[in-house]
Amino acid sequence: MQELLAIVTITTLAVISPGPDFAMVSRNSLLHSRRAGALTALGIALGVWVHVGYTLLGVGLLIRESIQLYAALKLLGALYLIWLGVRMLRSRTHDAPAPNAPNAPVARGDLAALRAGFLTNALNPKCTVFVVSLFLQVVGPDTPLAIKLGYGAFVSGAHLLWFALVALLFSQGAVRARLLRWRVAIDRAFGALLVGFGAVLAGSALRR
């Protein structure tokens, strides 16, 4: 029971802390659609299983013990975030008509939204550290595999629930209508955030 309580508490605090996942879901929900935001949230939840999978296979211990491997993964994730951010900074959102305009653009494709969420989480070093630390320090080595998989399902489900709520909030008609007046600035702001996250991660990886 103590193990479960620790899992629930740490996961809740980690999920709601701002980061690349939050930026991606809120941006897709606001500038595309509620469906795009929800699918991005689903992609994030699926991405969690990448971290859970390699941790249960023992690779998580290798990542934690190998400074070079962890730095390489950190740098890869940082480059992906920077690439995403630059794309947002260079996007021509200001050329698109308003969502209710007769020639409004088609909402972001389902696969693209799902892929964006999956890759943002799967390549997020913050999530790597979180899941690896959670399973190696909180979960006992004698805990049955079925229970460990249950913990993984909880972590994934918590991500899905939280970010689905974020998608719901940012796609609300009244909220979205007001914020979309500033859609150019918002896209640039989210792009700058991702570039900033990536730059910080890349800097820390290179210092190692």
Image (spheres, grey):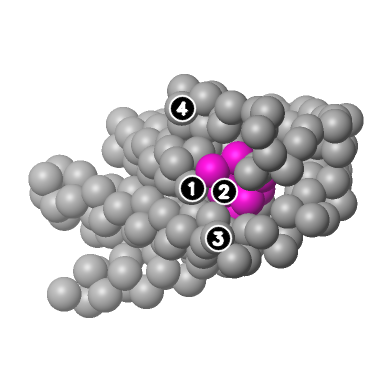
* Direction from residue 77 to residue 145 in the image, left or right: left
Relative to 182, is 42 on the left or the right? Answer: left
Closer to the chain start, of discs 1 and 4, is: 1
Q: Which of pointers 2 and 1 lies earlier in the amino acid sequence? A: 2
User: Which residue is denoted by mark 3 in the rendering?
Assistant: 173
Q: Please identify the quadrant where the N terminus is shown.
A: bottom left
Q: Cα distance, mark 1 to mark 3?
A: 10 Å
Q: Position of residue 156 (x, y in %)?
A: 34, 49
Q: Which residue is mark 4?
A: 110
Residue position for label 2: 29
Q: Amino acid at mark 2?
A: Ser
Q: Which mark is residue 34?
A: 1
Quick one: label 2, few (<14), some, or many (20+) residues within 10 Å?
A: many
Which secondary structure lies at badge 4?
helix
Q: Is residue 78 left or right of residue 19?
A: right
The residues bearing labels 1 and 4 have C-alpha atoms spaced at a distance of 11 Å
Residue visible at 23% across and 69% down in the picture: 4
Relative to 192, residue 161 above or below:
below
**Considering only vertical position in the picture, is 138 above or below 38?**
below
Q: Measured along the vertical axis of the image, is residue 20 above or below residue 12?
A: above
Nearer the observer, disc 4 or disc 3?
3
Q: Which residues are magenta?
A: 26-33
